[in-house]
Image (cartoon, rainbow, N blue to C red):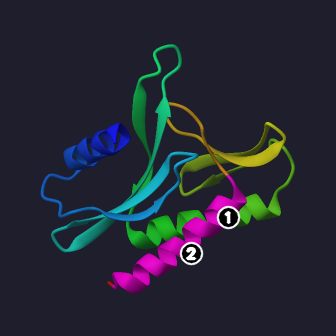
Amino acid sequence: MKNLIILSMLLLAVTVKAQKPVLIYEDQLTHNRITAIFEDDSEQIYYTNTYAKPWTGKMVTVMVKSGSYDEMNDFFNQLLEFGEDNKDVNSTTEINGTNVSIKKKIGAYLIEIETDDIPIYTSSKELKYIVNQMKQYRVEYPE
């Protein structure tokens, strides 16, 4: 509940005249969340992550990436392709201005997305689900 309140405050601060956000994807384990917000005649897609700050344990929500539907859909598809094609630890690339790399964490190969605060981790399995959710969102909310 606290995470929802923090995310709502963050999104409302970013979008003053926004309508009710539409949740596209949420993972309770990784705390990754993708939300669409309609502003006037446009829509923005926000990819956020909530994590506990070291030492204090205070929950913080960070913006991983944002953009139009087409930009975000392209980002997730490229990220998925990078994750599936590169199994070498420390493989790196830049996707739409965001640095990403492959890291091994607790025995699993994960995709690390660099942000200003902390790196965000995701998997190819999660990205496949995100790409499918983005397609389903577009069917439910056509342009």
How far across and down, in percent of the image, does residue 127 sit? 63, 62
Image quarter where the C terminus lies is bottom left
Position of 132 relative to 92 (above/below): below
Q: Residues within 10 Å of mark 2 (few under 14, many from 20)?
A: few
Instruction: State the residue position of label 2.
Output: 132
Closer-to-camera residue (31/118):
31
Position of 124 relative to 142 (above/below): above
Q: Which mark is residue 80?
A: 1
Instruction: For residue 2, say whether it is visible.
Output: yes
Q: Residues within 10 Å of mark 1 (few under 14, many from 20)?
A: many
Question: Who comes first in sequence, dot 1 or dot 2?
Answer: 1
Closer-to-camera residue (101/109):
109
Q: Main secondary structure of the magenta part?
A: helix
Report helix, strand or loop for mark 2.
helix
Q: Residue at x 51, y 72 (%)?
A: 133
Instruction: Specify the segment rendered in magenta.
Output: 123-142
Q: Which quadrant of the structure image shows residue 112?
A: top right
Position of 111 relative to 107 (above/below): below
Distance from disc 1 to disc 2, alpha carbons, whole Å, reads 11 Å
Q: Does the magenta segment cover residue 129?
A: yes
Amino acid of disc 2: Asn
Q: Does the magenta segment cover residue 131?
A: yes
Give the foreground label among 1 and 2: 2
Image quarter where the N terminus lies is top left
